[in-house]
Amino acid sequence: MTTTIKVSDELRDRLKAQAARDGLTLGAHLAHLADADDRRHRLLALQKAVAETSPEGMESYVAESAGWERTELTDATA
């Protein structure tokens, strides 16, 4: 299904030029922009969560991460 969105001619031309530059359709370019914005919001939420982590929680995370990094992964089916 397709739909029409109302944007200024200048914005339409700018988006079309960006899409063409990357070899994309306008729809694919808009999807890429939407995905990038979703990712930006996820990273901001992660940044906020890390900033709000208590010192004890961060200490626990660091210790657990160090333990996993020392773990040798082997094939459990052997």
Image: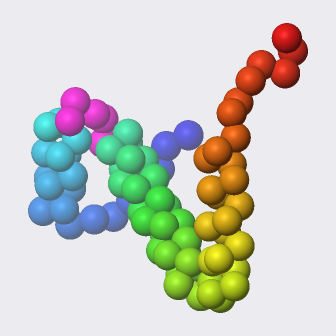
Rendered residue at 62%/67% (across/down): 62
- Location of residue 50 (image quadrant): bottom right
Identity of the residue drawn at 56% across and 40% down: 1
Write the start and end of the magenta stretch as one range: 22-26
Q: Is residue 24 magenta?
A: yes
- Looking at the picture, does residue 57 appear above or below residue 62? below
Q: Is residue 62 visible?
A: yes
- 2 vs 48, nearest the viewer: 48
Residue 58 at x, y percent in the picture: 63, 77
The quarter holding residue 37 reads: bottom left
| Count of number-bearing discs | 0
> As displayed, is residue 17 above or below residue 65?
above
Dominant SS type (magenta)? loop
Note whether residue 9 is visible: no
Q: Horizontally, is 68 left or right of 35 in the view? A: right
- As drawn, is 75 to the left or to the right of 54? right
Q: Position of residue 36 (x, y in %)?
A: 40, 56
Residue 52 percent location from the top left of the image: 59, 88
Residue placed at 20% from the left, 36% from the top? 22
**Location of residue 28 in the rendering, given as x and y in whole percent from the top left corner:** 38, 39
Residue at (45, 53) in percent of width and height:
35
Between 20 and 48, the one lying in front of the other is: 48
Tell whether position 68 is magenta.
no
